[in-house]
Image: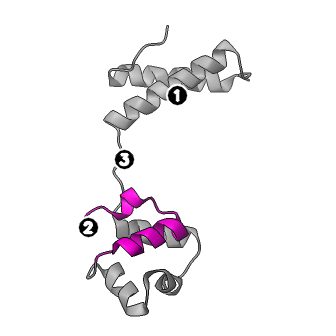
Amino acid sequence: MLKLIKNEEQYNEALMQVYQLMQNDVKEGTSASDELEILSILIKEYENVHHAIPNPNPLDAIKFRLDQLNMSETELSSILGNRSRKSEILSGKRKLSLAMIRKLNQILHIPAEVLIQAY
């Protein structure tokens, strides 16, 4: 019987159940696949509350995304305006404007909730 995960012991047990289910060739539409899906949801909810990962600093997120996309900071200048503005933003001397946040969200696909945080 599946039930809510309320403590670390139950969390670890649920992780073990998921591990055991994933070792089998679970076919979609079976009771085992339903159990796996429900356990995954329960684990995710528990982790969101008890093991939440905070959003990164906006500047770190921008630098990380540039690295992921193999883009240079020079290419960032075309998104943020001119070179000096880019330097001021990455050094923390200038804050991101709403227009910059929108562009970074649209072009680099950095979530807006990350970019609007105080830093």
Task: Between residue 60 and residue 18, name the one nearer to us.
Answer: 60
101 part of magenta stretch: yes
- Foreground residue among 82 and 92: 82
User: Does residue 74 sit above or below 7 in this rendering?
Assistant: below
Task: Find residue 4 and name its label.
Answer: none
Q: Secondary structure at mark 3?
A: loop
Identity, as a three-letter code, of the amino acid under mark 3: Ile
Q: According to the image, label 2 marks what residue?
A: 119
Q: Nearer the viewer, mark 1 or mark 2?
A: 2
Q: Amino acid at mark 2?
A: Tyr
Q: Residues within 10 Å of mark 2 (few under 14, many from 20)?
A: few
Check residue 10 for magenta coloring: no
Specify start and end residues of the magenta stretch as a single range. Answer: 95-119
Q: Secondary structure at mark 1?
A: helix
Q: CA distance from mark 1 to mark 2?
A: 34 Å
Quarter in which the C terminus is drawn: bottom left
In the rendered image, residue 59, in percent from the top left (x then y), is placed at 36, 71
> Which residue is rendered at x = 48% and y = 83% of the image?
73
Q: CA distance from mark 1 to mark 3?
A: 17 Å
Q: Earlier in the sequence, mark 1 or mark 3?
A: 1
Report whether 40 appears left or right of 82: right
Of pointers 1 and 2, the one earlier in the residue sequence? 1
Residue 53, numbered circle: 3
The answer to whether 20 appears left or right of 74 in the picture is right
Colour mapping used in the image: one colour
Looking at the image, which is closer to me, 85 or 23? 85
Q: Which residue is mark 1?
A: 40
Q: Nearer the viewer, mark 2 or mark 3?
A: 2
Magenta region, main secondary structure: helix
Query: Mark 3 and mark 1 in contact (Cβ < 8 Å)?
Result: no
